[in-house]
Amino acid sequence: MISRTLQDLFVDRLIQLDRFRQSLRGASGRRIIVVTAPEGMGKSWLLRQFANEAQELDARSVLIDFSDGQAYDALALVRRFRDALDSAHFNPLTQAINDTTVPRLSIDNGPGERSSASISLGSGSEIGDVSIGDVAGGNILKDNLFIVQTDNPLALQALEDRITSVFFTCLAALSQETKIVFLFDSYERNSLESDRWAPNTTDRWITSQLLTRIREGRLANVLVVLAGNQVPDFGIEWNAVLGRLPLEPFTPDDVTQYLRENRGLTLGDTEIQTLYTAIQGNPQLLGILGDNLEQATRPSVADDEW
């Protein structure tokens, strides 16, 4: 079986890649890139290629696919960002998280006598062999991984504001040393409605905290890509930093290159035209077609040969 990399199979999208490189290198003022297209047009594929490009240009990147089924609040987001961008640069954030998250213990006194108690443990406290605010190794603080527990929305907002403030202080410092790319896939999952954009808490945080700081010039060397079937509506105040990259169907030449050069299939012009007519340039269908054609032409391998 032939083993191929993403770059081996990647085809077209040269305009999108070039514009991403321009933004990452600072040759363009477009610091927020919006990639919109229907299902199957290669948005996820393109974002993975963006991540590879960032690595080649010595930039740090974090990719979140909102179709992963996880619930993202401010705490979950900054934890993912921290872990992907190198925890050592976010020790103040981890300390702030440890200071604002506490374990809750439920005490069962037997049938009909259940009660509960909240026990707050500050940094440096211990539960048995578990140390809160411990150093995990080297100069990286260990996250206690507890969640914020409060029934008071004002208190919750105050805690999130503190964690958010510390995160962006750390991010701004890191961005002075290296370029940073945030890649958000399946962004349509952050709308509460399908026929119009109705932001959920995740989108409100990303827009009001991350994107707004970029628009205001407070985050040097930070680039964000939003990809989805549907994305937020941005007003004219975003025009100076916003770049849109729609994805069009592949052309017949793209399909020919993919099947002949990238997949190594021996197909005549008539066969390729027939296949193009069937898939209408849809990248997802083209990938499935390439897999199936390769499988059909690949010699069978006995179990004892692998």
Image (cartoon, grey):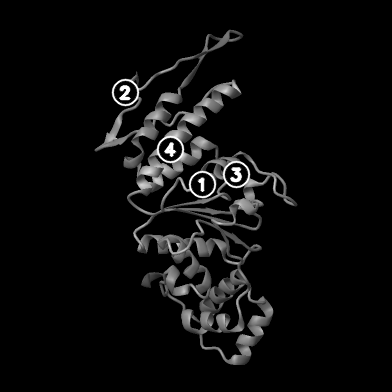
Asked whether, in this view, residue 199 is left or right of residue 89, the answer is right
Sequence order check, earlier mark of 3 and 1: 3
Q: Secondary structure at mark 4?
A: helix
Image quadrant holding the C terminus, namely: bottom left
Of the residues shown, which amino acid type is indicated by label 3? Asp
Q: Residues within 10 Å of mark 3 (few under 14, many from 20)?
A: many
Sequence order check, earlier mark of 2 and 1: 2
Residue located 47% across and 29% down the image: 162
Quadrant of residue 280 within the rendered picture:
bottom right
Against 298, residue 222 (above or below) is above
Query: Which residue occupies the extreme right position in the image?
Result: 195
Of the residues shown, which amino acid type is indicated by label 2? Asp
Task: Report the disc number at residue 216.
Answer: 1
Q: Are marks 3 and 4 in contact (CB under 8 Å)?
A: no
- Residue hosting label 4: 167
Q: Secondary structure at mark 3?
A: helix
Against 134, residue 295 (above or below) is below
Q: Are marks 2 and 3 in contact (CB under 8 Å)?
A: no
Nearest-to-viewer mark from 2 and 3: 3
Nearest-to-viewer mark from 2 and 4: 4
- Residue hosting label 3: 203
Against 232, residue 273 (above or below) is below
How far apart in space, not on screen, are marks 2 and 4 (Cα)? Answer: 28 Å
How far apart in space, not on screen, are marks 2 and 3 (Cα)? Answer: 38 Å
Residue located 61% across and 51% down the image: 237
